[in-house]
Each structure stands twice: as C-alpha cells, then as structure tokens.
Image (cartoon, rainbow, N blue to C red):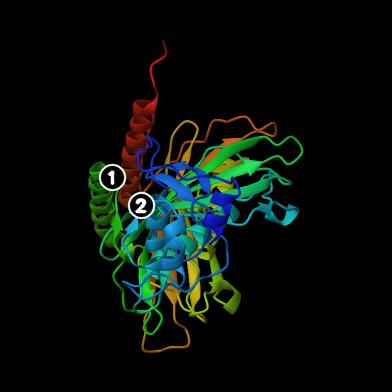
Amino acid sequence: MRLAMQHKQGGPRPPSAGSSQPPLEGGGCATGHLGEKAGQGRGGWRSVHSSRARRPAPAGCPAPGLARASRSLSPVVLLSLLEHSGSLPRRLCCANQSPQRIMRPDDANVAGNVHGGTILKMIEEAGAIISTRHCNSQNGERCVAALARVERTDFLSPMCIGEVAHVSAEITYTSKHSVEVQVNVLSENILTGAKKLTNKATLWYVPLSLKNVDKVLEVPPVVYSRQEQEEEGRKRYEAQKLERMETKWRNGDIVQPVLNPEPNTVSYSQSSLIHLVGPSDCTLHGFVHGGVTMKLMDEVAGIVAARHCKTNIVTASVDAINFHDKIRKGFVITISGRMTFTSNKSMEIEVLVDADPVVDSSQKRYRAASAFFTYVSLSQEGRSLPVPQLVPETEDEKKRFEEGKGRYLQMKAKRQGHVEPQP
C-alpha cells in the first residue's frame, strides 16, 4: 500500500481521528493515490488521481490485502481505502487533476490569446473524466457520463500562448441521475512560475449505459461532510432543472438569413456554420463530445461579435449551455448565432445547434443544444471599448433584447452583491 509506505517513511500523514483538520476525501473515484492533498474545494479536501485505472473490488468486500494491511494503518487511512474499494459509500468530494498542457500557437485566436473554445473543450474533458469515474465506482452496468448542461463559465483572465494550463475538477453534488462538477482552470507562466485563475465553470452530467446510450443510469450516492452542502446542491439542481424546462420553448426558433441587412441590426451580424460530424469529434460510443460542440458554438458566437463591432473580441462568459439531445457520428450540424442584447461594453449572443441525420430518413432535424455567450470588445492594446448598440427591428427581436437586458441586470446585481465593502 502506497499510503502505508509513505507513513512509515515519514511522508504525508493523514490527520488523526482527534485532529481539527478535515478528513481526507477519497470521494469515490475508481483510480488514484489516496491521501495526497491537492487543495480545498467546495466540499473539503481533495485527492490527486493518477491515470492508471484500478478495478474496484466487489461491493462489501475489501480490496485484496486490505485485511492484512489494516493492522498497520490508521483508522482514517483505512476508511479511505474501504471507500476506494467500494466497501463503503463515497464521500464528497471527488477530485481529478488532469494532465498539464502547454498552450501552442494553434490554440490562439486572432488576438493572440488562447481561443475560448479550446479552454471550454479542456473544461468539458476534465468534467467528463471525473464524472465517468464516479459513475463507474460501484459494481453494476458500466456507463459513460454525457454533458447535459453548463451552468456558467466565467473567463476571469486571458490565457497566453506558451503558458501551461492546469485543469482541476471536483464533484460538488449528485442527484439520482445527474452529477454536478465544478472545474477550475489555472494558467502558469513557466518562466516566472506565476499562476493565475483564468476560468471557473459548473457542469452537469448524466450517466448513459454502454449497452444502450439512450438509457440513463443511477448515480452512486455520496456522503456529504455537512448537511448544508446537500441542501445547497439540491437547490442548484432544482434551479437548473427549471431553467432547462424553460429553454425548451425556444427549440422551434430558426435563424433565417436576410438580404442586404442594415448595420447594427440582428440580421447584419447573424452567422451560421455547417459541420459534418466525423469520428474525431466523437466518443468511442459514436456521439459527439460536449467539448467539441462548445468549441464550435464559441467560434460562431465570436464571428457574430466581430461582425457587429469590427474589433478584437474575447469571450467574457458562457451562460446556460443546454444539451437537449445527443448528436451522433455522421450527422450534419448547423450552429447558428444571433445578437440578442448589447450593453455599453458587452454583447450577448444566442447560439443554437441543430442536428440533421442526413443518412437516416426516419429521423427529422432537431435542436441539439442552445446557449448564451457574452463577449467584450477590445482595442489593439487590450483595453475595453464601447460596443455599438444593437438595433432590434422585429417584435421577436425586441422581446429577446428585453430578455437579454434582464439577464444582464440580474448578473450585474449578483456580481455587485459578491463585492465586499471597502473599509
């Protein structure tokens, strides 16, 4: 046992039963080295996981050799090992440290920073890994975690080419059929060692059976260290579920092209991209990675923003990406974007993804995903610029403008509410 070896050799010691420090969190991941501290998140201590998979022992049975090793292990370490082996329920929270990746020139946008879609793809991959590990942490039907919704993604600071991206994820809540994952992205300047937080995101996943990807399985339960964690998580779950239901009415919307549109109108900047889904876009089970879809959506939103303001633009945030249905290999997807609202220095863009099963006449075109992106306009020196005001023309455009204004004011009030008063 690696933990036992570290303990004997003077390595990291877990807190004792009477210590004031929080217990180590094994979290229910099926792989990794328990007991190594990777930082503290919403649910407590986290453990760093390696990429080598380990088959869990049958439920109720300790891992081989655990009984022999138990005499030399502390109660806290033994408890973590029992959780890891599947003998006990998983505790919150489970953490995953994804491999570090250096940002290269092909990751850049036209402004020279890392493309927002590239960061979104890395965020989704980290969330998919940790949620799939957790959903397979107990014996039963094997599954893969599919992205159902991105609650919100904040772009706090730009990431530059040559920096190293560190992506960490933790499970913060589970319901019967879904997993909430919090993902943070750090950028590191490898010349100076300076690190900064660039992105924060909240994502929801559902486990789909490997035998039948249309079947949603149950999520293994977790035990929360505080009752408030479960209550807060349940509130977030109910809120996102309600918002998902409210977005379904938009599924009939179609972005229609307009000839000779006037500048600063919705029609002037609206854009579409058509993409044939190939094997490189898909999981091993034949449907599109959520990160691939998000990257394409970000590209279209960026084109809309650039056409509207004619300057450099960057993603400020992504709000409420809803994945309504899976997209399979061989489908043709149309990603459409249109401006919905502008403030003095930001633009809200709605992006719709439609999937067309061109080789299957029994299926009709359907809405696969929808989202709202927020962009800001920048000068050549990277300073924020005023945004040309959108001119809504039709009644639908005016309605969407007012709805976007409401979201903008709500988010502005929320940000101001989080600002601590100055002494």
- Near mark 1 (Cα within 10 A), the count class, few <14, some 14-19 or many ≥20, is some
The location of residue 84, given as percent across then percent down, is 42, 63
User: Residue 86 location in percent, x, y?
Assistant: 37, 68
The residue indicated by pointer 1 is 229
Q: Which structural element holds mark 1?
A: helix
Disc ID at residue 92: 2
Residue situated in front as seen by the camera: 53 or 306:
53
Taking 154 as reference, is 157 left or right? right
Left or right of 221 in this view: 378? right
The amino acid type found where label 2 is placed reads Leu
Residue at image position (52%, 56%) is 4
Q: Position of residue 204 (x, y in %)?
A: 37, 58
Viewer-proximal residue among 412 and 12: 12
Q: Nearer the viewer, mark 1 or mark 2?
A: 2
Q: Which badge, 1 or 2, is on the more N-terminal residue?
A: 2
Specify the quadrant that holds the C terminus.
top left
Residue placed at 53% from the left, 58% from the top? 33
Q: Is residue 420 above or below residue 297?
A: above
Q: Are marks 1 and 2 in contact (CB under 8 Å)?
A: yes
Q: Nearer the viewer, residue 28 or 142?
A: 28
In the image, what residue type sits under mark 1? Gln
Question: What residue is at 40 percent from the left and 64 percent from the top?
Answer: 134
Q: CA distance from mark 1 to mark 2?
A: 9 Å
Q: Is residue 12 visible?
A: yes
